[in-house]
Image (cartoon, grey):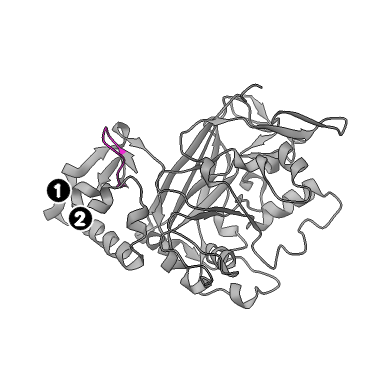
């Protein structure tokens, strides 16, 4: 979504420009302030519009109309791309889950017994989903002090999480399930997510339940959605699984995705997480999310959880990169980080293979840390 003085409307990024779809296609649905109305029209419509846009861009006879509808990216404001319904965050990277297990439960089996049997997830807070570029205020809450007694104050272990999100376009009614093979009929596209985390709050409050205040303060999303139809060249077979997934989670085609993420802290590249290494696919996540009959709606989205690979430079959060603070990062400017400081800016970007050897860009999701509110 973009605006240039008027209300937000739907645009397609073309290099350093934005193509105004309402202007070039002349349809009211693209003048709406979110993608929801268009996404609700279903997969056949998504495919048709994508084909029409492709034709506009490649045929000479449409050049004048296209040029009239192009807006320079530098002259527009970008917005949250869809109206968020429910939000679910998964924990689908084996490398990330194992590293967290080693840090939080030293001397024990890194993965809990259920992890290889189902995509572990939790329900997040949709009301604090932020558009890329929105500043993030450092959260406050309870955490354990050095003497083992809980104290209240601003988080001292604020972290980033490099993730990939998937937005539901066509919902499913209560009491039904979306099967793995039906994934592409329901999910419109993928985008970048930074699910900011307060690790000190998280380790204290997650006993025995899952994250609460440690996650609910902010989740940043990129302004660009890459349609699943555009990611055909990025589809790969998922990583090997053992044991074999249960029948309702069995693969129905290669729904692993070869996405190359990059994480920058204050402009410095600190990690290259590979989405290709994920244990659970987005199709399996959606199947598990609905297998109990839970409904989905247009604008619901779910995220992959932190994307991490097997190598140190592929870890998708500072908890792993600094190994819980024991191995600080030294940035190229000489500054040192274990967790995020006030004023730090995090930028996550990604690309995917496209047709004829091209790369498809996902844009960026960016956020800068503001000091905690006193009181």
Q: CA distance from mark 2 to mark 1?
A: 8 Å
Question: Tag 1, which secondary structure?
Answer: helix
User: Most extreme residue toward the front, as rendered?
Assistant: 174
**Does any portion of residue 328 appear in the rendered image?**
no
Which residue lies under the disc numbered 2? 56
Q: Are marks 2 and 1 in contact (CB under 8 Å)?
A: yes
Q: Is residue 96 left or right of residue 360?
A: right
In percent of width and height, residue 260 lies at 51, 51
Q: Residue at x 85, y 32 (%)?
A: 149
Which residue lies under the disc numbered 1? 65
Main SS, magenta region, reads loop
| Closer to us: 58 or 142 | 142
| Closer to us: 349 or 83 | 83
Mark 1 burial class by Cα count in 10 Å: few <14, some 14-19, many 20+? some
Q: Residue at x 68, y 46 (%)?
A: 211
Q: In the rendered structure, which segment of residues is drawn in magenta?
A: 3-12
Asked which quadrant contains residue 215, the reply is top right
Q: Residue at x 31, y 43 (%)?
A: 15
Q: Quick one: label 2 or label 1, which is nearer the N terminus?
A: 2
């Amino acid at each position: 979504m973009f605006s240039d003085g008027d209300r937000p409307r739907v645009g397609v990024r073309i290099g350093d420009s934005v193509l105004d779809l309402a202007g070039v296609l002349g349809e009211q649905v693209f003048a709406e302030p979110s993608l929801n109305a268009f996404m609700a029209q279903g997969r056949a419509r998504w495919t048709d519009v994508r084909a029409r846009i492709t034709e506009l861009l490649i045929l000479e006879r449409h050049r004048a109309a296209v040029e009239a509808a192009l807006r320079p990216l530098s002259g527009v404001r970008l917005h949250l791309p869809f109206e968020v319904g429910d939000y679910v965050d998964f924990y689908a990277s084996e490398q990330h889950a194992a590293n967290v297990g080693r840090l939080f439960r030293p001397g024990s089996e890194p993965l809990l017994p259920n992890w290889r049997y189902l995509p572990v997830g939790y329900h997040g807070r949709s009301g604090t989903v932020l558009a890329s570029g929105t500043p993030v205020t450092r959260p406050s809450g309870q955490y354990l002090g050095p003497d083992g007694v809980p104290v209240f104050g601003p988080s001292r272990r604020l972290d980033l999480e490099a993730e990939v999100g998937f937005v539901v376009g066509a919902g499913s009614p209560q009491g039904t399930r979306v099967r793995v093979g039906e994934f592409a009929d329901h999910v419109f596209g993928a985008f970048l997510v930074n699910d900011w985390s307060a690790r000190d709050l998280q380790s204290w409050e997650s006993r025995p339940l899952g994250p609460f205040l440690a996650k609910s303060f902010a989740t940043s999303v990129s302004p660009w959605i890459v349609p699943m139809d555009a990611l055909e060249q990025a589809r790969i077979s998922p990583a090997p699984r053992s044991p074999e997934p249960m029948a309702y989670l069995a693969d129905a085609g290669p729904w692993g995705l070869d996405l190359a993420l990059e994480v920058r802290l204050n402009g410095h590249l600190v990690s290259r997480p590979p989405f290709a290494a994920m244990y659970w696919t987005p199709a399996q996540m959606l199947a598990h999310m609905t297998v109990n009959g839970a409904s989905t709606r247009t604008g619901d989205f779910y995220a992959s959880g932190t994307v991490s690979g097997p190598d140190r430079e592929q870890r998708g959060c500072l908890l792993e990169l600094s190994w819980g603070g024991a191995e600080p990062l030294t940035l190229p400017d000489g500054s040192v980080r274990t967790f995020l400081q006030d004023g730090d800016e995090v930028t996550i970007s990604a690309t995917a293979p496209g047709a004829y050897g091209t790369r498809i860009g996902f844009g960026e999701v960016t956020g800068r840390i503001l000091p905690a509110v006193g009181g």
